[in-house]
Image: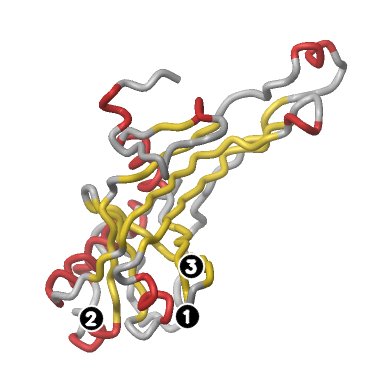
């Protein structure tokens, strides 16, 4: 894959792919398409000098990536002001080749490096939490009871600028050794996808409370 100069703005020595570099992309459109498709992320960071990974929800606003957690969380405290690595992955299919060596998966992944910044201003924090809620569940924030000062205080919101990152994507059929295409072995792809199921009401819902229309606007994948 040939990159245009403007497509490589997120490419650095740390973010560039060393292997299978033909699957790599460093343009924002490709990267953002992956980040916006999958809210679940894994954040790599150092805790007491040792590597650790936190699974959590991420969301993007413009050219920043956000996540949140408890203000009392050891992980959140360790991340503040430190370098972190955030990864997002979607599996799109199993790839079955004619040899075990060439079996693979179709996937979309994103990796973003940066220094975590804590959002301190309460109004800014509330705005970010609203963006997260409405990003996941469009239109839901305004239907909820207002967030309290204590809830804002108890919640930490962090972000990193999206300046150093890469996307890696594999799709399509198996890629076998040329001589193996003559073998009588089935090869192909077993596609997979995320699928939202029908909503299940809380048994504690008040009588007469109907399912909101905004549930139909939830998307993933």
Q: Residue 77 carries which label?
A: none
Whether residue 5 sits left or right of residue 199 in the image: it is left
* Distance from Cα at disc 3 to Cα at disc 2: 21 Å
Q: Is residue 165 above or below residue 183?
A: below
Q: Position of residue 220 (x, y in %)?
A: 43, 49
Q: Quadrant of the N terminus?
A: top left
Q: In this view, does 208 lie above or below 61?
A: below
Indicate which label's residue lies in the foreground, 1 or 2. 2
Residue at the spot x=51%, y=66% of the render? 53
| SS type, badge 1 | loop
Residue 70: image quadrant is: bottom left
- Which residue is tagged 1? 203
Numbered marks: total: 3
Residue at the spot x=55%, y=32% of the render? 170
Q: Residue 54 carries which label?
A: 3
Residue 145: image quadrant is: bottom left
Q: Residues within 10 Å of mark 1 (few under 14, many from 20)?
A: few
Q: Residue 152 carries which label?
A: 2
User: Along the line of sight, which residue is nearer the eye, 205 or 118?
Assistant: 118
Residue at the spot x=68%, y=24% of the render? 174
| SS type, badge 2 | helix
Q: Earlier in the sequence, mark 3 or mark 1?
A: 3
Residue at the spot x=64%, y=37% of the render? 105
Say how the picture is coloured.
secondary structure
């Amino acid at each position: 894959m040939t990159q245009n100069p403007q497509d490589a703005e997120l490419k650095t020595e740390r973010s560039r792919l060393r292997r299978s570099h033909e699957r790599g992309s460093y343009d924002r459109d490709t990267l953002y398409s992956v980040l916006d498709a999958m809210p679940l992320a894994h954040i790599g960071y150092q805790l007491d000098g040792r590597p650790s990974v936190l699974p959590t929800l991420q969301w993007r606003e413009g050219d920043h990536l956000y996540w949140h957690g408890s203000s009392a969380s050891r992980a959140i405290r360790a991340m503040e002001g430190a370098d972190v690595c955030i990864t997002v992955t979607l599996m799109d299919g199993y790839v079955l080749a004619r040899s075990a060596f060439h079996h693979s998966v179709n996937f979309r992944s994103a990796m973003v490096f940066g220094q975590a910044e804590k959002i301190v201003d309460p109004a800014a924090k509330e705005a970010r939490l609203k963006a997260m809620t409405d990003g996941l569940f469009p239109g839901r924030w305004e239907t909820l009871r207002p967030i309290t000062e204590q809830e804002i205080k108890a919640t930490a919101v962090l972000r990193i600028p999206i300046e150093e990152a890469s996307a890696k994507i594999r799709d399509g059929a198996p890629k076998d050794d040329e001589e193996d295409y003559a073998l009588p072995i089935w090869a192909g792809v077993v596609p997979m996808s995320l699928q939202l199921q029908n909503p299940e009401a809380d048994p504690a819902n008040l009588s007469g409370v109907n399912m909101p229309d905004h549930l139909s606007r939830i998307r993933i994948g």
